[in-house]
Amino acid sequence: MSSTAKASYKKLQGTLELTDSHLQWTQDGKKVPSVRVQLHDAASLFCSKEGATQVRLKLGLVNDDAGHNFTFSATPQEVAYAERETFKTELTTIIGRNRSSGVSAVGAQTPKGPVVASVLAATPGVLSVSRASTSRATSVVSEGRTLILPGQDAATDFRLRKRVLLANTELLALHKDLVMSGQITETEFWEGREHLLLAEAATESQKRGRPGQLVDPRPQTVEGGEVKMVITPQLVHDIFEEFPVVAKAYSDNVANKLSEAEFWKRYFQSKLFNAHRASIRSSATQHVVKEDPIFDQYLEKDDDELEPRRPRDEILDLYINLGATLEDHTETGNEKDVTMQAGRQRGALPLIRKFNEHSERLLNSALGDVPHSKRRRTNGGDGESFSEIEYDDLQDHESSPGILLEMQDRQRYFEGQLGRAGALGSGAEDSRDVIDVQSAFREFLMGVDEWESKFSQLKIERKSSDAALLSMTQNVSARLETKTKKSDFPPDLFRQLTTCQTAANEFLRQFWTSIYPPPSDLPTPASSAAQRSAKAAKMAGYLGRTHEKVDALVRAAVLEGVEGNRVVVAMKPLMDAVDHALAFHRARSAAVGGFERPGAKLV
């Protein structure tokens, strides 16, 4: 299979070529292709309509819906159309094969000339279309109803897995490469990742609370300078809940004196609406709005006195009560907290209290219909006042009171201690000196005398602090440079490197978890030793093909004009981990085959 045609890409003339493994476009006058797409990445195909001025073809990729656009430029246009149809027919067959098998069957063919096999084609179990389809049917179809989380129904379990994969593109790509191709099963893939499903389930089970935004309808300006207000049933419900006086005015006047449309029109033009605005500037608009004989009846005086109009009937929690500790430490003196006193700007008091009432309504909606007294009992009771003002950050939770020593005849122990102390006191003076508190206090005052002048002469060396700051700055700069530095590998080659690394890392994770199963809090049945041994052997077989994948990547890099040694260096940490796992598996298999003695342990 080989087709060529004259085509332009991004308004540049060149040659489009379809080989057994790639679709590539080379600009005229250059030898290295500018666009090189592996056929197993082809996902969708779009063509221009027959009779259009330009004969176009768009190829969408697996991880890139934008894909590439080509314009066939052969003359006359009938020739360009025929060439486009040839590419269309062959690409349609390839895309259908990709969708049916999940992976490309290019690796199973025997192309002419040196062809670099894809990363996925080098893995066991995908050497042919029929074998890949059978493996995929075994892993996906048969395990489609396998539950990962116990206690969940099949539909919920599937939905959680789908949401986790859609939220993590890298995990989705790994799932597509390994599970959809049949290399590992669905259960094996999610083993060790149950915490992701549990976190997603916890997120779904959370109940959304009421929005904390204060109801403040804002008019919209339309063409011609007119102002309109969009009224929805939810807005009406919020207004009635936030301002009960509006609900009372609605029930008193609608259907008797006013229609509903006229009611809302007059309300948004009244002083009552401006009094409900969540802005201190609304007081300035009260002088320009017109009076309304209906809504003016429901106006209330501004709540701008020192004491609020509606005091709270609940006893404040001592932890947040600023006046609870007003009389503490009177021996040293206390100054009144003037920073938290409201009323300096009298016009702000109604707005502050409006926000306080709104916050209280939000809290009450979250707590439910629970009496205030029961809330206080739930929080510890009225008698435990000290626990309400105790700061948890000041408590040493790691300290231990020690272990109580159990003694027999404890009275004789203390009598013996007193007898020895009396014998020492009769022969000599007590070694403990009596401290004179007044002289000690005078000595302390003399020590802190002129502390201001001594403190001003204190000099702290800056060498250590400057060195620490410089070290931290260099560390952050190095991390930022590493993060922002772009790879100079070609995009297609870099994607293959990433795919190979993530696949091998997953095989390594599956291998080591089968050797050393991690503890799990989930009530899932534990695998038997034979199952874990079979899984380890299976993963070791996949890991044994990693060298072939890396060799294929080196050959692909040479074709892309990249030095092959750079690929070897980039993949060396991965290869070291793979070699260590394979060496461990060989030693373990040899020990088991040679009847490993009891008590021996391989490390």
Image: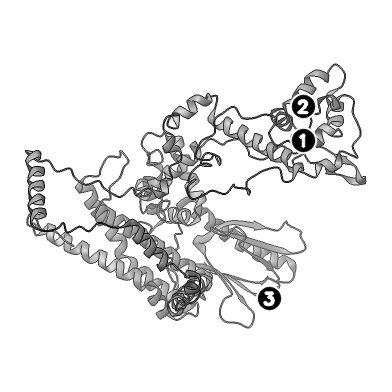
- Vertical relation: 183 (above or below) 187: below
Circle 1 crowding by C-alpha within 10 Å: few under 14, some 14–19, many from 20: some
Return the disc, 3 or 2, that comes first in the chain's sequence.
3
- C-alpha distance separating marks 1 and 2: 10 Å
- Work out whether residue 291 or residue 582 is closer to the camera in this orientation and state it: 291
Residue picked out by circle 1: 276
Question: What secondary structure is marked by label 2?
Answer: helix
Q: How far apart are marks 1 and 3 (CA)?
A: 67 Å
Q: Nearer the viewer, residue 472 or 588?
A: 472
The percent position of residue 577, horizontal first and vertical second, equals 30, 67
Left or right: 311, with 76 as reference point: left
Residue drawn where x is 79% and y is 31% of the image: 301
Check the image and report above or below for 364 versus 426. above
Q: Is mark 1 on a helix, strand or loop?
A: loop
Is disc 2 surrounded by few (<14), some (14 to 19) or many (20+) residues within 10 Å? many
- Can you identify the residue that label 2 sits on? 246
The image shows residue 234 at horizontal and vertical percentages of 70, 31
Q: In the drawing, what numbered circle is on residue 294?
A: none
Q: What residue type is labelled 2?
A: Val
Q: Check the image and tell me how it is coloured.
A: one colour
> Residue 73 in the image: x percent, y percent?
71, 71
Residue drawn at 75 percent across, 25 percent down: 245
Viewport quadrant of the C terminus: bottom left
In this picture, residue 409 sits left or right of residue 65: left
- State the residue position of label 3: 13
Q: Which of marks 1 and 3 is in front?
A: 1
